[in-house]
């Protein structure tokens, strides 16, 4: 990867110019990730690991909590511990400059982060936004992987607010400029469709990969919980199922301090305005995009989905 002058993050345009388009796959990440790419690629996967994969803002946290509870036999008491501890974010903080990591007093030094992941007790639940190409190559042949996807318009809106919330994005643009950046693959983890399509194809012929949609979780949470339980080989009593549905509603999860990431404010990582658990709706994009903007995103979506049998038409 290219190296950049610091501080490359201070201005969004500089930051975008500085994003690394790595191989394979041309995914967009930062040089700080580049320093560690090999270490992450060679990470030792355990057969009883469960990994939750997604493009940012697709319902990752929701899915992590759901999967953690099922994998841990509905241990609601244990689920009172911080989700970030129960289910670490694989590539973070390798994405941000070292000096920024050390300024977050609560985070261990970068060097310690991977050791912590390696020492976690089984079954580990690991979250990542990295595409399959950049993850340990044996991942989907070794352990279970749950992928969650969300319609791109709601992802754009949610990611825009995420950029406003998280200090180190230093983002000061408006929604429309953000949507254009998104479609030009100028955001972390872009291109969006690259990883969605690659995982969709992988899930077709690999029983270790379960592909979920945010919108299905919204429409039929109970049905999706049963699907995940079946995938993980777990059975649930009616009582557990009812408790899970209750626990996982937006209303309850957004009030749950072990999951809602409100402590990001205390640690100085988030701005005071806004919440990580923002709105939790399908179709919120309709409040933000003009008919012309919506048409452009549809066109971009259609172009990218040409030749694929995945569809978001019923998800919007
Ligand atoms: P919004 O910004 O649209 O509200 P991720 O965890 O991948 O970053 O995704 C965050 C998005 O998932 C946010 O979307 C958040 O509100 C939403 N979310 C989290 N928990 C949810 C729940 N229980 N029900 C619905 N949406 C949820």
Image (cartoon, rainbow, N blue to C red):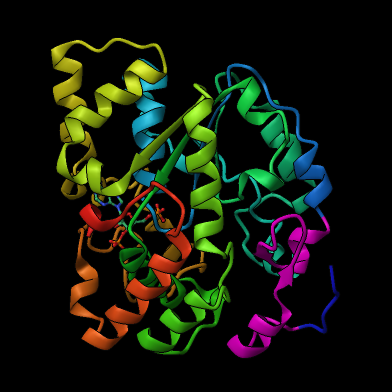
Which of 292 and 12 lies nearest the eye of the viewer?
292
Residue located at (63% from left, 53% from top): 92
Q: Quadrant of residue 253?
A: top left
| Residue 215: percent from left, percent from top | 24, 49
Furthest residue toward front: 307
Compared across the picture, whether 55 is left or right of 8 comes to left
| Position of 309 relative to 270 (above/below) | above
| Position of 7 relative to 280 (above/below) | below
Residue 26 belongs to the span the image colors magenta: yes
Quadrant, the C terminus:
bottom left
Magenta-highlighted residues: 7-35
Residue located at (55% from left, 52% from top): 195
Which of 172 and 178 lies nearest the eye of the viewer?
178
Ligand 1: give its quadrant. bottom left
| Residue 272 visible in the displayed image | no
| Residue 109: percent from left, percent from top | 75, 52
| Residue 77: percent from left, percent from top | 32, 24
Quadrant, the N terminus:
bottom right
| Residue 238: percent from left, percent from top | 14, 14
User: What is the number of callouts on the image?
Assistant: 0
| Position of 177 relative to 158 (above/below) | below
Residue 31 belongs to the span the image colors magenta: yes
Compared across the picture, whether 94 is left or right of 225 comes to right
Residue located at (29% from left, 80% from top): 295
| Residue 118 visible in the displayed image | yes
Which of 245 and 143 lies nearest the eye of the viewer?
143
Which of 226 and 292 lies nearest the eye of the viewer?
292
Compared across the picture, whether 130 is left or right of 211 comes to right
């Amino acid at each position: 990867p290219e190296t950049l002058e610091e501080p490359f993050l201070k201005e969004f345009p500089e930051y975008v110019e500085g994003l690394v388009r790595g191989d394979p796959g041309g995914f967009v990440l930062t040089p700080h990730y580049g320093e560690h790419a090999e270490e992450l690629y060679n990470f030792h996967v355990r057969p009883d690991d469960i990994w939750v994969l997604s493009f940012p803002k697709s319902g990752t946290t929701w899915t992590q909590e759901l999967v953690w509870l099922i994998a841990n036999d509905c241990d609601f008491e244990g689920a009172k511990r911080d989700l970030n501890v129960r289910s670490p974010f694989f590539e973070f903080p390798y994405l941000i400059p070292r000096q920024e990591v050390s300024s977050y007093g609560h985070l261990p030094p970068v060097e310690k982060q991977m050791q912590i992941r390696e020492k976690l007790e089984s079954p580990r639940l690991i979250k990542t936004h990295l595409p399959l190409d950049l993850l340990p190559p044996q991942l989907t042949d070794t352990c279970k992987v749950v992928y969650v996807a969300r319609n791109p318009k709601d992802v754009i809106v949610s990611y825009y607010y995420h950029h406003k919330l998280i200090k180190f994005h230093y983002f000061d643009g408006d929604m429309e400029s953000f949507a254009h950046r998104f479609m030009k693959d100028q955001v972390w983890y872009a291109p969006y469709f690259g990883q969605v399509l690659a995982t969709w194809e992988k899930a077709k012929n690999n029983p270790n990969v379960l592909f979920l949609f945010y919108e299905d979780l919204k429409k039929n949470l109970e049905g999706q919980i049963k699907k995940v339980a079946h995938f993980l080989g777990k059975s649930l009593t009616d009582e557990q199922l009812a408790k899970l549905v209750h626990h996982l509603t937006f209303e309850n999860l957004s009030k749950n301090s072990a999951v809602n990431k409100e402590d990001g404010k205390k640690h100085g990582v988030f701005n005071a305005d806004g919440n990580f658990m923002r709105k939790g709706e399908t179709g919120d994009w309709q409040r933000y995009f003009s008919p012309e903007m919506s048409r452009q995103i549809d066109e971009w979506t259609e172009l990218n989905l040409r030749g694929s049998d995945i569809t978001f038409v019923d998800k919007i």
